[in-house]
Image (cartoon, rainbow, N blue to C red):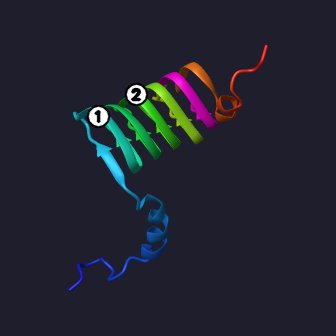
Amino acid sequence: MPRPGASAAPSHATPDHGHRADESGSRLIVGPNIKLRGVEIDDCDTLVVEGRVEATMVSRAIQIAENGSFRGTADIEVAEIRGLFEGELTARSRLVIHATGRITGKVRYGKLLVQEGGEISGDVGTVAERAAGPKPA
């Protein structure tokens, strides 16, 4: 028997399912108060960092939460940074630095969006610059 006010089938079930198809891949969540060190992360579609990670990763996406931090090397398609990233970051498609996000180190990106308050410092350039390599003298 359905609860009062609840319908048997939510009217948004089909559109929601279609929207979640993008998130159906493998996902690793490093929760708050968790420290993950000295690892290589491969074959992970999305890494969500709410704690601290020191690693090397090749993935589709990384999401660093406001209190999360990542130190190491990441080669990914899309990065969303709300916390701290230190090291070498290549975001081949898109890099988004939110107002609370900070990145330091060597950074390469396809497209860049920095919200007011977001910070990026170090050796910063596009993926195309990395592919072109050093210019002859």
In the depicted structure, whether residue 130 falls above or below residue 10: above
Looking at the rendering, which quadrant does residue 111 occupy?
top right
Q: Amino acid at mark 1?
A: Gly
How busy is the neighbourhood of tag 1: few (under 14 within 10 Å), some, or many (20 plus)?
A: many
Looking at the rendering, which quadrant does residue 38 occupy?
top left
| Foreground label between 1 and 2 | 2
Residue furthest to the right in view is 137
Q: Magenta-highlighted stretch: main secondary structure?
A: strand
Q: Residue at x 69, y 29 (%)?
A: 129
Residue 11 placement (x, y as % from top left): 43, 77
Q: Residue at x 50, y 38 (%)?
A: 75
- Check if residue 114 falls in the magenta segment: yes
- Say which residue label 1 marks: 51
Q: Residue at x 54, y 34 (%)?
A: 90
- Say which residue label 2 marks: 72
Q: Are marks 1 and 2 in contact (CB under 8 Å)?
A: no
Residue 18 placement (x, y as % from top left): 49, 69
Q: Residue at x 45, y 42 (%)?
A: 58
In this view of the protein, which residue sits in the foreground, 7 or 73?
73
SS label for mark 1: loop
Residue 1 placement (x, y as % from top left): 20, 86
Stretch of the chain drawn in magenta: 103-115
SS label for mark 2: strand
